[in-house]
Image (cartoon, grey):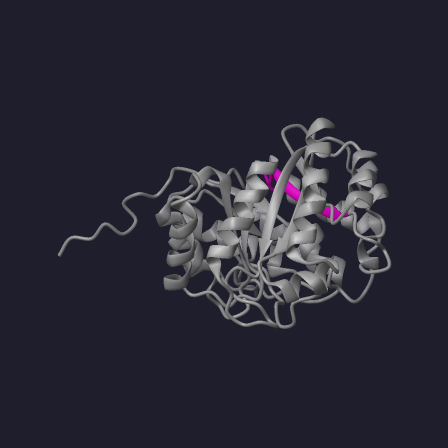
Amino acid sequence: MSSTLFESLPDAVSVYEVSPRDGLQNEAVTVPTPAKVRLIEALVAAGLKRLEVTSFVSPKWVPQLADAVELCRLLGHPPGVSFSALCPNQQGLDRALATELGEVAVFLSVSETHNRKNVNKTVAQTLAVFREMVPAALAAGRRVRGYLSTLWGCPYEGAVDPERGVEIARALLEMGCYEVSLGDTIGIGTPVQTKRIVEMFLREFPAQRLALHFHDTRGTALANVIVGLELGVRTFDASVGGLGGCPYAPGAAGNLATEDLVFTLHGMGIQTGIDLDKLVEAGRVASAVVGRELPGKVHKAGVRALRR
C-alpha cells in the first residue's frame, strides 16, 4: 500500500517565538526587565529571528508587561532579527510607535465572550478600532501581524464557528496585516479538527498569509503542527520551555514548547535556522527567570539523553 504522508514536506519553516510576551504575561511573580533581556538575548543567540517581546497593554491589567517601553529600548537591533509587540488599542499603538520596533500585532477572538473578557469590546467594535490602527501603523513604517484566538474552541462558549474566523481573518488581511496567526487558545484541537479548519482557511487565503499557534494543554499541539505542515502552512508560533498561557482563558496554560517543535522539525529534515542545543540553553534561562520547572518535553529530557 502506498502512502502520500510526508511527501510534501518543506525544506524549511519559520518559527515565531512568543515566550517573552505570551509566555511571561501570566506569571504570578514579576520578572525584572534585565531578566527579560537575558531571556530574549539567549533566544536570539539560538537563532530565532522573529520574536514577540512584549505587549503595550495597560499595566493595570497585565503588570508583568508594564516595562514594555524600557524593554524595547534595551533590546537594540540585532542584525536580521525582528521584534514585535501586541497593541490592544490606539493608546498601546502610540506607545509602540514611540519605540523603534519594526512590527506590531493586533489580536481578537472568534468568541464574543472571550473577546469581551480580553479587550472589553465586541468583535465588531474591536475590528472598528483596528481599521484605524492598522493603517496608522503601516503609515509609520511598521509591519502588522494579526492574531485570531479561540478558533478551535472557547473556554466560555465551547464550540465556535470557524467560518466566522474566516470572515475576521479576511478583515484583518484587507486592513493590511501581512499574516494572521490562527490560535488554539485552550489547547483543545485534534488533528482531524485542525485539518478541517486549516483547509477552510486555505480555500480563502494563500498559505504564506497564515501561521498556526497551538497550546499543548491536552498534548495535541505537535500532532496539529504535522497536519498544518502537510497542508502547506510554513509558520508556527511557539514558546521556549512551553512557557505561558492566556490570563483570560482558564485552563490554557502551556504553549507548544519551541524545543519540542524544533526537535521534531529537525528530525523530519526540515530546517529552522535554530541551534537546538542553544535553544535548550535558552529554555534553562527561561526556567531560571520564572523560578520554576517548565513543561516542555525536550526541556526536561534534553536533546539526546535524559539529564542526570
Q: Quadrant of residue 243?
A: bottom right
The residue closer to the viewer here, 157 or 293, is 157
Up the image or down, 304 lies above or below 83; here it is below
The residue closer to the viewer here, 279 or 247, is 247
> Which segment did they paint magenta?
46-55
* Residue for point 71% across, 61% down: 118
In the image, 204: left or right of 114? left
* Residue for point 70% across, 63% down: 116
Figure quadrant of the N terminus: bottom left
The residue closer to the viewer here, 182 or 75, is 182
Q: Position of residue 170 (x, y in %)?
A: 52, 44
Examine the structure image and report whether residue 53 is included in the region drawn in magenta: yes
Q: Position of residue 19 (x, y in %)?
A: 66, 53
Figure quadrant of the C terminus: bottom right
* Residue for point 48% across, 62% down: 161
In the image, 132: left or right of 2? right
The answer to whether residue 239 is seen in the rendering is yes
Q: Quadrant of residue 139?
A: top right
Examine the structure image and report whether residue 60 is included in the region drawn in magenta: no
Up the image or down, 278 lies above or below 113; here it is above
- The number of discs equals 0
